[in-house]
Image (cartoon, rainbow, N blue to C red):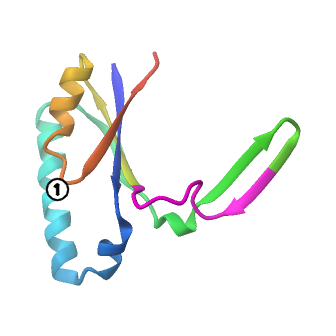
Amino acid sequence: MKYVLLVVGDEQPWAEAGPEERAAVYERWGAYDAFLTGRGAALGGHELAHSSSATTIRKNGDQVLISDGPYAETVEQISGYMVVEAGSLEEAIELATPMPSDVVIRGVPA
């Protein structure tokens, strides 16, 4: 089964990070990507642009409201995603645990 691993966290520390801090974070993500690839579980993923660049579309019947910015005011934002292949939720959890960030796991219906 495919699972989407939604990378969540506070964007503010990243915005304030210097080049060396960012390089260290990308190094940890590179190691995590190598872990997933080594397990044959990596199907794709990407870092997302800052949540302030998001566009939200809300629908209420035939009415459509389009607004700039994230869909909800929260402390944590979705900053990226990975798609993995796992035999069960337990395996998806095992694959997500080494991620260098908090993560939300969602199954992808077949």
Q: Is residue 19 left or right of residue 74?
A: left
Question: Where residue 96 sits in the image (x, y, percent)?
Answer: 21, 38
Residue 9 in the image: state x and y as whole percent: 33, 58
Q: Is residue 40 visible?
A: no
Residue 24 spot, x, y in % from top left: 13, 70
Residue 6: say if magenta: no
The local crowd at label 1, few if under 14, some if 14 to 19, many if 20 or more residues have their Cα within 10 Å, is: few
Residue located beneath label 1 in the image: 30
Q: Which residues are magenta?
A: 65-78
Q: Is residue 31 left or right of residue 65?
A: left
Q: Is residue 83 above or below residue 10?
A: above
Label 1 amino acid?
Gly
93 sits to left or right of 2? left
Which residue is depicted at the point 13% across and 59% down? 28
Residue occupying image coordinates x 14% and y 63% = 27
Q: 62 above or below 19? A: above
Between 70 and 1, the one lying in front of the other is 70
